[in-house]
Structure formats: C-alpha cells, structure tokens
Image: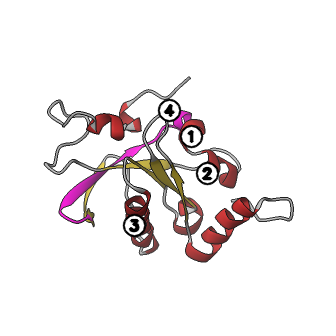
Amino acid sequence: MRTANDGMTPAEIKVLADIDENGVHIVHVAESARGPGYSYTIGMPYSFDHAEVIVFGLPPDVAEALLDAVADEAADGNKFAADGQHDGLLQGYPVKFFAVAKGWYPEFLETALWAHEGDGFDCVQLVWPDKQGRWPWRDDVREGFAEMQPVLGRREPPA
C-alpha cells in the first residue's frame, strides 16, 4: 500500500488517511454514458486480509453502508470468497460474490490500482438480486436490471 507524501493531492492523501483511520476507503463512480454507477473499497487486503469489493447499481449511500458492513465483517475475520452466497448483509436478501479478473481493474478500479501501486490484489464483486430474488443473469429478470448490474465474473475482460 502506498504511503502519503508531500507530492500527493489532497484527494490522494484522504484515500490513504481513510485507510489508516477506518481500514477502508470507499470510492463512488457516478453513472455515465459508459455504464452504471458503482462503488468499491480500497484497503481491504491491507487492513483485513480480504479482497477488495465492488458493487454496481446502488445509490452511493446504500453502497457505502453495504461495503462498510462487508468491511466490518472482514474486520471480525469473516471472509467473502468468490462463488459464495451469503445471507445477512442485505436485510431479507442473499448476496453472491464473484471474482473480478485483473483485466477489469483498469476500467473499474483506477484509484485502487494507484493505492496498491499495481494490480497485486484480489477483488470480488458483490451481486444482489432484485426484489423478487432474481439474479441479473436470469432470463426472467426485469428489463434494465442486468444492465444496471453487470456481473464482471461472468464476462470476459477486455484484452
């Protein structure tokens, strides 16, 4: 993990200070013409020996609360491994985790790449179902749900 120095911007220093103080910094990326909004952690491997976590399609405040809950669980020694389903993070709904291939990192984890000084860390995607309990890859999921939550672990990364 990078260490703060005088040549860094205030935003860069804040990322590192949040990790030192809270164990994790959460980045929010707004929806754009390129795709849906998403949020991700920085500091999980450093602070909790856990993969970074990314989640798509949630409002920033909801994503932050969810990622904070994941960090709290990781701080208690719980691990959320790829290909696992977990209850208790979202009230009334299970969530699943998928490994994120390093080929996706430049597109979605730019600040994490900077903080880690490269791609020497793992990342998992937290995927949540719709209100009817359907996952984004199911044929019967409502229109737009799959686009709002691309499942990187089920797609080939860019070359």
CB under 8 Å between callouts 4 and 1? no
Residue marked by disc 1: 105
Cα separation between marks 3 and 4? 25 Å
Nearer to us of marks 2 and 3 is: 3
Any mark on residue 112, and which?
A: 2
Q: In the structure shown, which secondary structural element does the residue marked by tag 3 occupy? A: helix
Q: Position of residue 14 (x, y in %)?
A: 68, 66
* Side (left or right) of 139 relative to 40: left
Residue marked by disc 3: 65
Q: In the structure shown, which secondary structural element does the residue marked by tag 4 occupy? A: loop
Q: Say which quadrant the N terminus sits in.
A: bottom right
Nearer to us of marks 3 and 4 is: 4
- Circle 2 packing at 10 Å, graded few (<14), some (14-19), many (20+), is many
Cα separation between marks 2 and 1? 8 Å
| Quadrant in the rendering for residue 91 | bottom left
Nearer to us of marks 4 and 1 is: 4
- Circle 4 packing at 10 Å, graded few (<14), some (14-19), many (20+), is few
Residue marked by disc 4: 34
Q: What residue type is labelled 1?
A: Tyr
- Circle 1 packing at 10 Å, graded few (<14), some (14-19), many (20+), is some
Q: In the structure shown, which secondary structural element does the residue marked by tag 1 occupy? A: helix
Magenta residues (range): 90-104
Q: Where is residue 105 in the image (x, y as percent from the top left)?
A: 56, 40
Q: Residue at x 26, y 62 (%)?
A: 90
CB under 8 Å between callouts 3 and 1? no
Query: Is residue 92 highlighted in magenta?
Result: yes
